[in-house]
């Protein structure tokens, strides 16, 4: 049996791609590829990956065997960025796939961009309790992505693809991925991209400051939803020039290990591109001159509104029903 493993990595469009695959599962099946998430309400196989972690109440090998049996000899597509987590018993997972033809696919992203995206992610999740500024090290994510890919580099049939729109077949990660797995892209529903959408940097920085006050999960969720209603103007690249150079340095060190796995035609230059940082950038990543720019007053007013609404949410939690 052919098995395709899409392992992410984190912050490379995985949520949008998984939603696309789930929405088009019937058409995929008609073309010989079965994409059936572990739990119907989840668009991915994260529960399967977590079943191979210590302390799981689920039995990983049994769960995986069921996934393969349900495919009825068609190609099985499993997608979970959790497979990159160090807690996953990767040796056991791959042992369960012996005898099958396994193809592994991962996308890699510009080192500075992935640090910013990961920072956005951890600030938005209450259970991470993230309070440190973007530009404070260690970063929210390894810029080179080596931390999550190191074990997979030992797998000979790993293919690394570029998280770079200019190199995507059809201009989208969904059409690009279909080409990667050998499925014709006609007839698919490419609408409703969805996914795990980030907040504009000024708003996620405001949320980070809120995190320092230790809001409850309910308060945190309410504030995130309010922030999503605010339209923010484009801001300068939030990483400092020094940190961008550091991120690119990490990627340069990783490239020799990555190159044997690059897909045909992979153009690696995008991974080393500089970013337009400002010399006026505060160490914490906010351009000082922009703080006082009149054009930002709409955001400032919106944030004051957030504070008032958050205060009302907090008061309701104190007063009770």
Image (tube, rainbow, N blue to C red):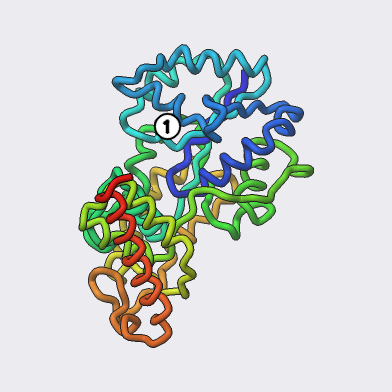
The residue that appears at 52% across and 25% down in the rendered structure is: 38
Image: 25 above or below 15: above
Image: 25 above or below 247: above
Report helix, strand or loop for mark 1. helix
- Choose top left, top right, bottom left or bottom right for residue 76: top right
Disc 1: which residue: 83
For the C terminus, which image quadrant? top left
Residue 60 on image: x %, y %: 42, 17
The residue that appears at 23% across and 71% down in the rendered structure is: 283
Q: Check the image and name the residue furthest to the bottom.
A: 294
| Nearer the observer, 181 or 304 | 304
- Picture mark count: 1
Q: Check the image and name the residue furthest to the right.
A: 187
Label 1: few (<14), some or many (≥20) within 10 Å?
many
Residue 160 on image: x %, y %: 50, 43
| Nearer the observer, 291 or 119 | 291
| Nearer the observer, 104 or 51 | 51
Look at the image and tell me whether residue 280 can be seen.
Answer: yes
The residue that appears at 32% across and 54% down in the rendered structure is: 123
The residue that appears at 45% across and 53% down in the rendered structure is: 109
Image: 214 above or below 127: below
Look at the image and tell me whether residue 103 can be seen.
Answer: no
Residue 304 on image: x %, y %: 34, 72
- Choose top left, top right, bottom left or bottom right for residue 285: bottom left
For the N terminus, which image quadrant? top right
Residue 226 on image: x %, y %: 42, 60
């Amino acid at each position: 049996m052919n098995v395709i493993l899409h392992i992410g990595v984190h912050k490379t469009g995985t949520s949008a791609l998984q939603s696309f695959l789930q929405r088009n599962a019937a058409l995929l099946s008609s073309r010989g590829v079965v994409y059936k998430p572990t739990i119907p309400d989840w668009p991915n196989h994260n529960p399967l990956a977590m079943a191979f972690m210590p302390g799981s109440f689920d039995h990983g090998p049994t769960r995986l065997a069921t996934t393969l049996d349900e495919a009825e000899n068609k190609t099985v597509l499993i997608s979970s960025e959790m497979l990159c987590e160090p807690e996953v018993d990767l040796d056991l997972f791959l042992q369960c796939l012996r005898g099958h033809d396994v193809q592994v696919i991962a996308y890699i992203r510009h080192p500075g961009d992935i640090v910013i995206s990961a920072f956005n992610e951890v600030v938005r999740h209450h259970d991470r309790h993230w309070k440190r500024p973007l530009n404070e090290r260690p970063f929210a994510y390894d810029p080179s992505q080596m931390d999550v890919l190191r074990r997979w580099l030992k797998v000979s049939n790993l293919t690394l693809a570029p998280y770079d729109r200019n190199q995507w077949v059809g201009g989208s990660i969904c059409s690009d991925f279909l080409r990667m797995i050998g499925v014709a892209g006609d007839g698919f529903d490419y609408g409703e991209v969805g996914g795990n959408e980030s907040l504009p940097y000024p708003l996620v920085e405001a949320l980070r400051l809120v995190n320092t006050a230790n809001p409850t999960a309910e308060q945190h969720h309410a504030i995130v939803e309010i922030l999503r209603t605010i339209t923010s103007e484009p801001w300068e690249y939030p990483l400092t020039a020094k940190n961008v150079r550091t991120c690119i340095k990490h990627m340069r060190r990783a490239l020799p290990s990555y190159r044997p796995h690059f897909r045909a035609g992979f153009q690696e230059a995008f991974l080393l591109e500089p970013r337009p940082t400002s010399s006026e950038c505060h160490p914490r990543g906010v351009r000082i001159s922009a703080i006082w720019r009149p054009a930002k007053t709409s955001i400032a007013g919106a944030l004051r509104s957030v504070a008032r609404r958050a205060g009302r949410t907090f008061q309701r939690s104190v007063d009770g029903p």
